[in-house]
Image (tube, rainbow, N blue to C red):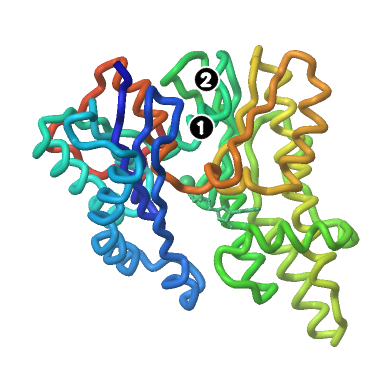
Amino acid sequence: MDELILAIESSCDETSVAVVKNGETICSNIIASQIKSHQRFGGIVPEVASRHHVEQITSCIDEAMSEAGVVPSDLQAVAVTYGPGLVGSLLIGISAAKAFAWANGLPLIPVSHMAGHIYAARFVKPLEFPLMALLVSGGHTELVYMEEDGSYEIIGETRDDAAGEAYDKVGRVLGLSYPSGKEIDRMAHLGADTYHLPRAMIHEDNFDFSFSGLKSAFINLVHNAQQRGEELSPNDLAASFQASVVDVLTEKTVKACQKYPVKQLIVAGGVAANQGLRESLQEKIGELPNVELVIPPLKLCGDNAAMIGAAAHIELKKRHFADWHLNAAPSLSF
Ligand code: KG4
Ligand code: ZN
């Protein structure tokens, strides 16, 4: 019999509900983005996010069930992101998942948002262990070593800003709307790396990252030029910033894949949608004969519930269930 999981994700600014079959097939994956409501504030307003989740969650559940053509008695479990993320946003998803699970006599599976990002790769192909995951999102930049399903060792992480956060802050200086990663990526392909911004920690013997110095160097460059009345090319600025981020992420990731005996490199999180990063890793990981690069398709790189359903499949096999006291864990890692 097929295993069907209803998965709910509401950790940040996307309300998403999916039905996932056997941890590898997406039957439905409804994503209601609130980005337009947050854009005028230049970032996410937690209270606004929670209110949107409340408004959206019930219709997203209905839509996910009807698009998948299933009824509650077809399901084996309900999975929900319980962290990391915004506490108010997480609680909406958790409350909805508890209510649905309780009403239908289903077990409740708590899932880490970060594990979900990694398991988005499961929709591309089966994971082969040991593997390395480069997790790059608005809140995280981490290299994670996995020896088997459900085992996560963070071998390196950012000491300050996350990669996506740096994109969004630099985007504000360029006058772009939030979130600006996608637009900077597009502009970068039209410009050249002419400003030679710093590549922090690139030669250090560890797997940590730092992006706040790069962000400051970028802001200083723009402000100094403004004071001198000079015009800088926005496309060249975007290309220079992106070259620095991509060089550091690629260099450290390749080193990690050489040091650890990995069969696959998974790139996950919103910044995994970055074309510059995808191209650079394709080239450099392509030079390592034993490592296969697996990157989820663009629409599964950002926040979505299907990835939570894929991660939940592993937890269901282990019967890792939560009770009705499940709470949000805003700073959970895995
Ligand atoms: O994983 P995600 O959807 O949400 C979090 O869990 O944080 O990641 C969102 C982040 C934002 O910072 C956004 O600017 C960035 O991913 N992003 C990109 C691209 N698309 C989204 N950054 C660089 N290049 C892109 N193409
Ligand atoms: Zn995310």
Residue 111 drawn above or below residue 53 = above
Which of the 4 quarters of the picture holds residue 156? top right
Which of the 4 quarters of the picture holds residue 297? top right
The residue shown at (65%, 15%) is 263
Foreground mark, 1 or 2, reads 1
The foreground one among 136 and 307 is 307
The foreground one among 141 and 191 is 191
The residue at which mark 1 appears reads as 118
The residue shown at (19%, 36%) is 72
Mark 1 or mark 2, earlier in chain:
1
Assign a secondary structure to mark 2. strand
* Residue 60 in picture, x, y percent from top left: 30, 53
The foreground one among 217 and 293 is 293
Residue 140 drawn above or below residue 186 = above
Amino acid type for the residue under numbered disc 1: Ile
Q: Quadrant of the C terminus?
A: top left
* Residue 244 in picture, x, y percent from top left: 77, 50
Residue 102 drawn above or below residue 313 = below
Amino acid type for the residue under numbered disc 2: Met
Left or right, residue 124 beside residue 243: left
Is there CB contact under 8 Å for labels 1 and 2? yes
Give neighbour class at mark 2: few <14, some 14-19, many 20+ (Cα, 10 Å).
some
Count of residue discs: 2
Residue 285 drawn above or below residue 236 = above
The foreground one among 167 and 81 is 81
Left or right, residue 331 beside residue 117: left
The residue at which mark 2 appears reads as 146
* Residue 216 in picture, x, y percent from top left: 69, 63
The residue shown at (29%, 16%) is 1
